[in-house]
Image (cartoon, rainbow, N blue to C red):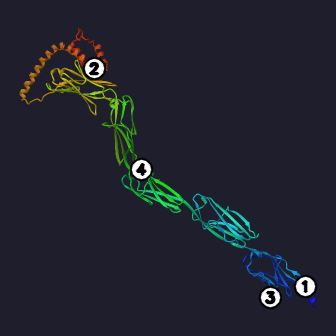
Amino acid sequence: LVGKVASYDRASAVFTQQPTDLVVVAGQPVTLPCSIPGYHGMVLWLRDGMALGVNRDLSGYPRYDIVGDHSKGEYHLLIQRTEMQDDAFFECQAIQAAIRTRPARLTVLVPPEDPVIMGAPVVSLRAGDPLNLTCHADNAKPAASIIWIRNGQVLNGAMYSKTLLRDGRRESTVSTLYLSASNIETGQRITCRASNKAAPNGKDAVVTIDIQHLPLVNLSVEPQPILEGNLVKFDCSAKANPPVIHYRWAKGGSIIREVSGDTYEVIVDHSFFTEPVSCEVTNALGSTNISRNVDVYFGPRMAAEPQSLQVDQGSDAIFNCAWTGNPSLTIVWMKRGSGVVLSNENILTLKAVRQEDAGKYVCRAVVPRVGAGEKEVSLTVNGPPTISSTQTQQVLYGEKGQIKCFIRSTPPPDRIAWSWKETVLESGTSGRYTVETVSTEEGVISTLTMSNIVPADFQTIYNCTAWNSFGSDTEIIRLKEQGTPIPFVPLSLRLAVIIGVAVGAFLALIVLMGTLGAFCCARFQRSKCILKPILSGTAKGKRLVSCKREYNIADKVCNETISCVEHWKTCLTILSDLK
């Protein structure tokens, strides 16, 4: 009977439900069906050929269970929380019936772990540097796909790699994104999204970009332009990441220690126009320094002081005078006492100077509506002495008289001599005559003093001559009796006096004409002797000799062809020219 039953069972045992290939996400439950109605023998489940248990006893696998109606032959395998080890082939066997289901592949999908961006949540980099972001999604089956997203837009160009784990089933994925410095901004948020079939919506990791930079500094100055002596304010505004640590102020390279904040107030002078004020702002990355000059209005200030010059006659004299001022200034060169503008440049050049060019020169600078300044220099011209004296000087008869000779000479005169008649006196006393020489800032004054004026002194010609290494000069001086005040006289008496004087003058003229001939010869001879020691070898002396030859004036003045009066007139003319 038993043998018949067994034979029946084998003949009638048929699987009405068999497991099929399934795909499941790890952690989810799954049921593999197996139904053999009317079969009462042993049922065995196998995973990759390994028996899990007999009938409903799967005590070795806590997550596994046999479910279904036993009376109906249902031996369904329930996996409560699928794991990677469940990724296998399963089959159901009826042992006594010697039949089995076809192997069914259970594929377990594993979502990637939450992606991780290296350096997140904030990645800091220095301004100007490119950005490299790395995101990895591990332990996924199949390997995760990674995309980068910014502002809702997918960023292309990322590099992608994956690594198979030791279990031979799961994989880890790494993606690297490169962005140039010009393609990133601070505060941007970039998303790394990893997905696979187990996580089709993906998992996200977000990083915020923090671009760090040196302080960005703006230095303002108010008000501008400003007149020297007024208050200005410097405002040093800075943007920095990381934040500002401290401020440092300087002027013209010198630290201003009493100021440490972001503003600086000061009363400005001309130096702020050329010496900039700087503000240095520092953060953890370093420092930024910015400077500003102030548009200060100020009057002329000497930058290059001109120097007085001493040059030889005929040479060039070059003065250099430099001023600074703001706004732009005007320079004028003039000679003191003259209104003629010689130059509007810093440099004044006087070509082939003469002695009359000597004097004071003024370099004047004017800043419109602000101020003016000037500097005086002297030009000294080396040359022969120049004598300037009154040719006729007055003295009182019977009193002490003086004749003055004023000499300008650069270099100073080596010798000064007075000569009259047969006498030459350079210094000291000779008879009634004394010579004294005094130096002043303007030149040299040589004074010839006569202790007692006599009538002959009014008839004498006096020569003042000075020499230096460049030459000499001579001046001829005459004496004139100084008049006395005229007392009040009645009109009738004054008319009688006038008539008497006129008659006397007429008679005197007749007498003079008679005696002039005899007098002129001796007079001319004396004049020639007076001139001889002074004029010998000089240009004026040569002119006298030439004149004597032209008029045939010999040592004996009077001859048959030329009267003595004419000789005397000629002599006076020559002497007048020699002045």
Q: Tell me how far mark 1 sits from mark 3, CA to CA.
A: 21 Å
Q: Which residue is mark 2?
A: 534
In the rendered structure, the answer to whether residue 274 lies left or right of residue 149 reads left
Amino acid type at circle 4 is Phe
Residue plotted at (11% across, 21% down): 502
Instruction: Please tell me whether mark 4 or mark 2 is closer to you in this view.
Output: 2
Q: Tell me how far mark 4 sits from mark 2, CA to CA.
A: 64 Å
Q: Which residue is mark 3?
A: 69
Return the mark for residue 10.
1
Return the mark for residue 273.
4
Q: Quadrant of residue 500?
A: top left
Residue 552: where, in percent of width, then height?
27, 12
Q: Tell me how far mark 4 sits from mark 1, CA to CA.
A: 115 Å
Residue 386 drawn above or below residue 244: above
Residue 32: where, in percent of width, then height?
79, 80
Q: Quadrant of residue 469?
A: top left
Amino acid type at circle 2 is Ile
Amino acid type at circle 1 is Arg
